[in-house]
Image (cartoon, helix red, strand yellow):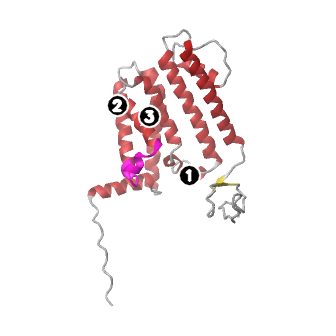
């Protein structure tokens, strides 16, 4: 009996080998891959620090050089992530990627988009909401209460810096009481917590609308953080019958369809 002919393997071109290497670094579990991703996260945190401090550094002679350097670093990282992903088109369909592309656009055109530069801190949100981060640093906390609390806290912190940057960009030097970044931060925290000391009040209808939006969104994010802290913890385990994704840690049956579950745990 004649053996079936083997399908010839597609030869690995240098470009394909390069993509495989990137995929291994960004998604692999080897010590080398983990160290590489840790280095990327450290660079990300340094970029975020620059984004937060940018309003204070914009008059420095080295600001533009540092801005374009950050743009080059971010562009290289995004290109590498796209090549490491299973499909570049699928990579571009992710909302987090669009947020990063917007951040990159503000870096490439700092003079044209400076009034939108405060949105660069969205990089903080995209980092802590990415599987890249949790698969590297938070592996033992992935899909746990720690992840939920961290994501809720980072969302609140990101909103705080976005509103602070917006107030600083829009009102600093144009309204008495907001003379610098710290004044904008003080106003944002006072409004966000609905403390309302009244020593700084944004002028006009636009200022009132900003204050209202800050209070409403701030309360919502505080409630979200409180829920993550105090609500009963759920584990993420997909029911094989009805696909319900969250269950009580000690659940034996799915509360939606009654299917017997086998949820992994660390108990003996």
* Magenta-span inclusion, residue 88: yes
- Name which of mark 2 and mark 1 comes first in the sequence: 2
Residue beneath disc 3: 47
Numbered badge on residue 68 = none
The residue sitting at 45% across, 22% down in the picture is: 55
- Name which of mark 1 and mark 3 comes first in the sequence: 3
Numbered badge on residue 139 = 1
Residue beneath disc 2: 108
The residue sitting at 43% across, 42% down in the picture is: 97
Residue 27 percent location from the top left of the image: 45, 54
State the quadrant of the C terminus.
bottom right
- Span highlighted in magenta in the image: 82-95
Disc 2, SS? helix
User: Cα distance, mark 2 to mark 1?
Assistant: 34 Å
Disc 1, SS? helix
Report crowding for label 1: few under 14, some 14 to 19, many 20 or more residues within 10 A (C-alpha). Answer: few
Report crowding for label 2: few under 14, some 14 to 19, many 20 or more residues within 10 A (C-alpha). Answer: some
């Amino acid at each position: 009996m004649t053996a079936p002919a083997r399908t010839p393997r597609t030869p690995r071109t240098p470009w394909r080998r390069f993509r495989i290497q990137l995929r291994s670094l960004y998604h692999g579990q080897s010590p080398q891959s983990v160290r590489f991703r840790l280095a990327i996260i450290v660079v990300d945190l340094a970029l975020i620090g620059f984004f937060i401090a940018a309003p204070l550094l914009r008059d420095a002679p080295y600001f533009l050089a540092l801005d374009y350097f950050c743009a080059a670093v971010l562009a290289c990282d995004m290109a590498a992530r796209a090549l490491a992903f299973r499909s570049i088109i699928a990579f571009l369909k992710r909302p987090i990627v669009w947020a990063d592309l917007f951040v990159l656009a503000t870096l490439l055109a700092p003079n044209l988009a400076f009034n939108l530069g405060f949105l660069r801190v969205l990089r903080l949100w995209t980092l802590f909401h990415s599987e890249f981060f949790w698969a590297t640093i938070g592996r033992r906390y992935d899909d746990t209460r720690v992840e939920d609390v961290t994501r809720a806290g980072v969302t609140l912190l990101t909103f705080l810096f976005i509103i602070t940057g917006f107030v600083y960009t829009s009102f600093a030097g144009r309204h008495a009481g907001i003379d610098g970044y710290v004044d904008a931060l003080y106003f944002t925290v006072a409004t966000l917590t609905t403390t309302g000391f009244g020593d700084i009040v944004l002028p006009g209808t636009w200022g009132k609308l900003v204050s209202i939006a800050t209070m409403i969104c701030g309360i919502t994010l505080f409630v979200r953080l409180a829920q993550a802290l105090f609500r009963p913890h759920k584990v993420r385990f997909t029911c094989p019958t009805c696909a319900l994704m969250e269950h009580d840690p000690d659940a034996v049956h799915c509360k939606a369809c009654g299917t017997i579950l086998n949820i992994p745990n660390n108990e003996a």
